[in-house]
Image (spheres, grey):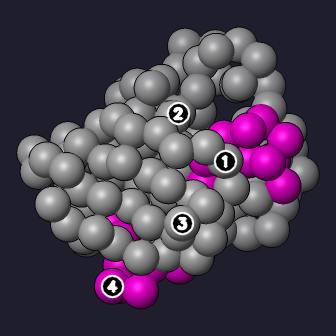
């Protein structure tokens, strides 16, 4: 078991499988929010499903449209379980709060896109500022 400390985040405790990239994240431009897949051809996760995954990114990009799109995804039940960032922006944090989508950032151990691997099983506890890798892929 590997414990990673981060800034206290938003949302409930969740667990699931990680989907990791060093790319940035925009709910507006990177996703097909109906099909639940990454749809921007230049994104490293192009064609992969984000539904039910714990997403791990470098940083968030975009403005208010990205924030309300997280809420829209949640109402359609096509949503990630959580989003982890090296650094999130305040607008996306507001969107995560509106969507009740767990989100954390600012990890003490370093670059989260290098510390977690796709397929790792994670427990994300935003209130404690803790992500635990329970099983490596």
Query: In the image, is 110 to the left or to the right of 34?
Result: left
Instruction: Please name the residue that numbered disc 3 is placed on.
Output: 128
Q: Look at the numbered discs 3 and 1 and tell me whether their residues touch, using CB distance below 8 Å.
A: no
Q: Look at the numbered discs 2 and 3 and tell me whether their residues touch, using CB distance below 8 Å.
A: no
Instruction: Please name the residue that numbered disc 4 is placed on.
Output: 109
Q: Which of marks 2 and 1 is nearer the N terminus?
A: 1
Percent x, y for residue 117?
A: 21, 55
Instruction: Please name the residue that numbered disc 1 is placed on.
Output: 11
Q: Look at the numbered discs 2 and 1 and tell me whether their residues touch, using CB distance below 8 Å.
A: no
Q: Nearer the viewer, mark 4 or mark 1?
A: 1
Q: Which of marks 4 and 2 is nearer the N terminus?
A: 2
Classify 97 as above or below 129. Answer: above
CA distance for labels 2 and 1:
13 Å
CA distance for labels 2 and 3:
20 Å
- 109 part of magenta stretch: yes
SS at badge 3: loop
Q: Which residue lies furthest to the front in this view?
A: 128
């Amino acid at each position: 078991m590997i414990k990673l400390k981060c800034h206290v985040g938003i949302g409930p405790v969740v667990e699931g499988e990680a989907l990791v990239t060093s790319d940035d994240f925009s709910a507006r431009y990177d996703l097909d929010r109906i099909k639940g897949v990454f749809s921007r051809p230049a994104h490293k996760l192009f064609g992969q499903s984000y539904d039910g995954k714990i997403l791990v990114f470098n940083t968030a990009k975009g403005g208010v449209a990205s924030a309300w799109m997280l809420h829209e995804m949640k109402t359609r039940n096509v949503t990630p379980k959580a989003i982890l960032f090296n650094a999130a922006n305040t607008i996306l944090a507001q969107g995560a709060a509106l969507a009740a989508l767990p989100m954390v950032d600012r990890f003490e151990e370093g670059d989260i896109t290098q510390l977690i691997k796709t397929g790792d099983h994670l427990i994300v506890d935003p209130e404690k500022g803790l992500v635990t890798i329970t099983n490596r892929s």
